[in-house]
Image (cartoon, rainbow, N blue to C red):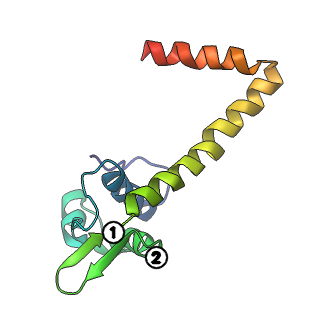
């Protein structure tokens, strides 16, 4: 997976989100080691302190943990926690604004379902 260097979010947040994506997609499963801070900083030419700040966001959230002398590992249940978190974000960032706009435009639920179904068929 690629790191989005053009994001409008702070780089450490982008790194944290990228690592989350690696966990969600199963690239790094539970109890598996994630890339080291040094590896990420060298690969993407980013200051190691910035990478560490992004990693620490995941540690603080209980999604990864450190094994002394071995590196950082994905915590048990991390994928499930992330999926719940992302679903909540999806609801707030996309569904709620969609429903507000549909209401303003007078689009009924059945019509909205049909529109979404048509978009899915075109994908």
**7 or 96, nearer to the observer:** 96
- Relative side of 29 to 109, left or right: left
| Residue 110 x/y as whole percent | 70, 16
Q: Which residue is drawn at 39% across and 63% down?
A: 78
Q: Which mark is residue 40?
A: none
Against 41, is 101 above or below? above
| Residue 13 x/y as whole percent | 45, 61
Give the structural element (helix, strand or loop) at label 2: helix
- Relative side of 7 to 115, left or right: left
- Image quarter (top left, top right, bottom left or bottom right) of the C terminus: top left
Give the structural element (helix, strand or loop) at label 1: helix
Q: Distance between the residues labelled 2 and 1?
A: 14 Å
| Residue 72 x/y as whole percent | 26, 74
**50 or 56, nearer to the observer:** 56
Q: Which residue is drawn at 55% across and 16% down?
A: 117
| Numbered disc in front, either 2 or 1 | 2
Q: Which mark is residue 51?
A: 1
Residue 64 occupies which quadrant of the picture?
A: bottom left
Closer to the chain start, of discs 2 and 1, is 1
Q: Residues within 10 Å of mark 2 (few under 14, many from 20)?
A: few
Against 49, is 27 above or below? above
Q: Mark 2 points at which residue?
A: 60
């Amino acid at each position: 997976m690629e790191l989005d260097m053009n994001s409008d979010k702070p780089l450490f947040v982008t790194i944290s989100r990228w690592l989350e994506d690696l966990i969600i997609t199963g690239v790094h499963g539970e109890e598996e080691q994630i890339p080291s801070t040094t590896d990420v900083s060298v690969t993407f030419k980013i200051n190691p302190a910035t990478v560490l700040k992004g990693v620490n966001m995941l540690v603080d959230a209980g999604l990864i943990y450190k094994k002394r002398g071995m590196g950082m590992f994905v915590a048990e249940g991390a994928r499930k926690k992330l999926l719940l978190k992302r679903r909540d974000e999806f609801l707030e960032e996309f569904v709620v604004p969609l429903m507000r706009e549909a209401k303003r435009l007078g689009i009924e639920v059945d019509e909205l379902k049909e529109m979404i179904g048509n978009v899915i068929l075109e994908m």
